[in-house]
Image: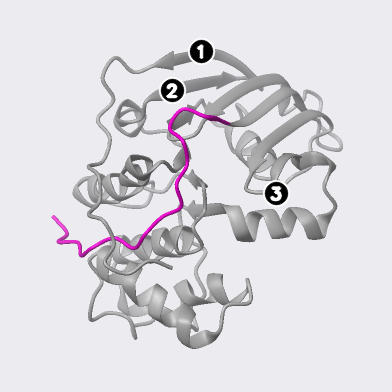
Amino acid sequence: MVRRGRRPAAGTVGVMTPLLSARGLTMQYPGGVTPALDGVDLDIAAGESVAIMGASGSGKTTLLHCLAGILRPTAGSVTFASGQGLVRVESLDDAARSRLRREELGFVFQQGLLLDELTALENVAVARMLGGVPRGQAEAEAAQWLQYLGLAGLEQRRLGELSGGQAQRVAIARAQVTGARLIFADEPTGALDSATSVEVLDLLLSATAQGRTLVVVTHDADVARRCARTVVLRDGRVVSDTAAPAATSGTAAPAAEVSR
């Protein structure tokens, strides 16, 4: 098991406060016979961990991309309670949606989507630098997160020098260093062995103990069982939305010694 350091401070979000809502969400790809999403309604509260499951082609990754503002749906709405108030994500222009993703959302994908030419420290710091934070401050904050996630001493290694689990922890650090209120994860444990998968999921779930929110797309029933809710899609529709009787979430991280 990874030995983690002290966690940097996170923004305060009221637990179970409505955070994200989708209404009538429809996505029809050009040339597609049937819609990838077909009238999806979904509410996600702050502090929740929600697993989205379904067979290949069920629409779960498309749903994540529409909720996160990566894709604009054909019809329907996505409302997010941002730090600046309620915003209709699908109505934002490209620049505004990019800013929303950069400042308030975090992403962890199956392959991490990190930059091979950068070190672990630089991969995390760049998320802050894109928001205008000076390089020195950004790297100091990145180092705090890498230490918390058990990567102290590996800051200057590039991706080829890290294991799959270590690279995913770099991706988690990048997702959280900005203070993102909502973290989207698409098959974050799909390429990892079972022991490393447990460690990575523990790290993701620990964010909810600090009031952050996690939405994870997964094929893995064990991952879904660890989340507070499981939403199942079939043919672009929600066919099941079930609260776990006793979700096993990550433990609360220690308070930070230094706040931003």
Q: Which residue is mark 1?
A: 240
As drawn, 135 above or below 162: below
Mark positioned earlier in the residue sequence (3 or 2): 3
Asked if the residue at tag 1 contacts the one at tag 2, i.e. Cβ–Cβ closer than 8 Å, the answer is: yes
Q: Main secondary structure of the magenta part?
A: loop
Q: Which residue is mark 2?
A: 230
Q: Quadrant of the C terminus?
A: bottom left
Q: Quadrant of the N terminus?
A: bottom left
Residue range corresponding to the magenta coloring: 1-18
* Residue located 59% across and 53% down the image: 104
Residue 243's x, y, as percent? 39, 16
Residue 177 in view of the camera:
yes
Q: CA distance from mark 3 to mark 2?
A: 22 Å
Badge 1 marks a residue whose secondary structure is strand
The amino acid type of the residue labelled 1 equals Ser
Badge 2 marks a residue whose secondary structure is strand
Asked if the residue at tag 2 contacts the one at tag 3, i.e. Cβ–Cβ closer than 8 Å, the answer is: no
Mark positioned earlier in the residue sequence (2 or 1): 2
